[in-house]
Structures are given as C-alpha cells and as structure tokens.
Amino acid sequence: MRKTGSRRAAKRAAPAPVLALALALGAAPASARTVTILAPELPPMMTAEGKGHEAAIIGETLEACGHTASFRVVPFGRHWIDFRDGAQAGAAADAVTTVPTGMELPGARSVPYIRYQNGASVLKRSRLSVASLADLAGKRVVTFAGALDVLPGLREAVPGFADFRERSDQLVHSNLLFAGRVDAVLADGLIFAEHNRLLLAKAEMGGTLPFDPRQEVVFAAIFPPTPYTMMFRDAALRDAFDRCFSDLEKKGRIDEINRAAVEPYRATVRNQYLRY
C-alpha cells in the first residue's frame, strides 16, 4: 500500500515543476521593459542617434536580459548632471552611461562594461615618438575637458608643456593638430580617429578646410585603459545588467563588439587600442 500511495503522490507532484516553469515563462514578458538611458554624444562610442560602440554593448546586454535600451543622448558632462538632478526631481531616466569608477552619483553602480584607451596622437611627419608624458615636455598639447581628473600624471606634467589646452569639442582637437597649432592630442584613440574621418569625409565632398586631413597620424597608448560603469536607479535592474554582461563576456560576444569597433580605425590606432 505504501508503494502504491507513493506512486500516486509522485504522480500528483510531477506537474508542479512544469506548472512553475509555465508560470515563470508567462511572467517573463511582463517583466520586460524599455530602459531609458542618459548618454553623452561621443562618436563612435555613442552617436546622437544612440548608435555606436558603447550603445552596442549596452543594448545587447539589456536585450539578453529581456529589456530594450532607449538612449537619451546629450552633450558630454550633461548626462551626469541630468541623471543626478533627475533623482532629486523624480525624473524618469532609468540609468546613465560612461560614469568613471570614482564618480559619486545616486543609484546602483554596474560592473565596468567598457574601457576607453586614451593616448597621444601626433602627426607622423613630426617624427615625434611618444612613449610617456615626459616625451611631450616643451610641446603644445590639447586634450578633452576634465582630462586632468582622468589621465594619470597629466596634472603634474602640465607645467612642462609649452602650451596646454582643454577643449570639450573634440573635433577641435583634430583641427588644431592638422593645422599645426598643437603637437599632440591626448584623447581616446577611437574618438580622435572618428573626428579625423569626419574631416576627411568633408574634404572628399568638396568642403574647404585650411589644412590637409589626409596627413598620417600616429597613436600611442601611453595611459592605462579607463574603465567606465553605469548607474541604475533600480538595483535589481543593475543586478540583471551585470549578470547578462558577464554571460555575454564569457561567450566572447563583448570581445567581438570591441574588435568590430576598433577595426575601422586600424590605420590610426594600429595595435595600440587595448589588446585589439
């Protein structure tokens, strides 16, 4: 009798895992959401249309979690301010991209999902070989706004430069280098190369430029890679992002996205951008 009762009990219990799975699958679509993300306009990392290297990583990661990314692209620096002020005002942005690991913002911080490779770009014809900031002593240097807080050793090196400028519009960097008004640009290799591409495209379409954008440029990765994180309003969404990012990384997909992002700029960055 015990055996028969056990078999009957087993038959009654068997559907429970199936029912649980069915309930879980039924609940999955309801948990999917469109995630509104503040991001800085930094082609080719993030274009005004919400495309690019960084957008691809974030978009695929959230998609792997069952969500959809919707980017709200603003000028660099304003993304942090809008996210912080939005928290105070109860505004709707769910997350913000490109947050330095040491920057304090409200919310839950993700794992580093992207690394920028900053370095020095010089004209090849200058014959200037740059292996460290010390090689730029006595030179004219331009970099992005806030670089003193991002690039190791830069603040200490500035007094040794012949001239030092910070410009938030990084297209200006390329203009200054090609025009011979600076000797070196300190910036991410892909961002700098993309602005060079834009200038070359303008020239090829008949646009007038006061310099030749075809001049060959050499990029040297003289700084360690800079990791960036995201901040999420919802810690559970952050946890999901971290988990799905780790899964894509293990599968090699993040590596594929990174490699594809570098390839169009190979002539400028050579093998100097991260390990690609």
Image (cartoon, rainbow, N blue to C red):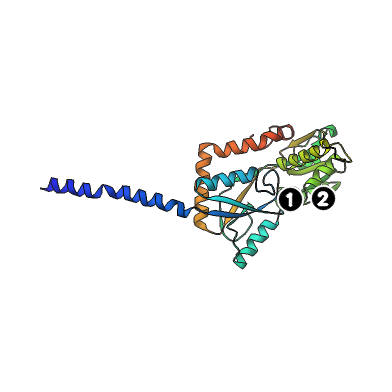
The quarter of the displayed image where residue 83 is located: bottom right
Name the kind of residue labelled 1 in the image. Ala
Residue, x 63% and y 45% (percent of image)? Answer: 54
Alpha-carbon span between mark 2 and mark 1: 10 Å
SS category of the residue bearing label 2: strand
Contact, mark 2 vs mark 1 (Cβ under 8 Å): no
Relative image position of residue 257 (x, y in whole percent): 60, 38
Relative image position of residue 198 (x, y in whole percent): 77, 40
The reply to whether residue 137 is visible in this rendering is no
SS category of the residue bearing label 1: helix
The numbered mark at residue 226 is none
Residue, x 54% and y 46% (percent of image)? Answer: 61
Q: Residue furthest bottom?
A: 89
Quadrant where the C terminus lies? Answer: top right
Q: How many numbered circles does the render carry?
A: 2
Name the kind of residue labelled 2 in the image. Arg
Relative image position of residue 269 (x, y in whole percent): 72, 35
Left or right side of 28 for 105: right
* Crowd rating for badge 1 (residues with CA inside 10 Å; few <14, some 14–19, many 20+): some
Q: Residue furthest right?
A: 210
**Mark closer to the chain start, 2 or 1:** 1
Relative image position of residue 135 (x, y in whole percent): 79, 39
Left or right side of 254 for 270: right
* Crowd rating for badge 2 (residues with CA inside 10 Å; few <14, some 14–19, many 20+): some
Is residue 172 or residue 93 the one in the foreground? 93
The reply to whether residue 130 is visible in this rendering is yes
Q: Which residue is mark 2?
A: 165
Q: Which residue is mark 1?
A: 147
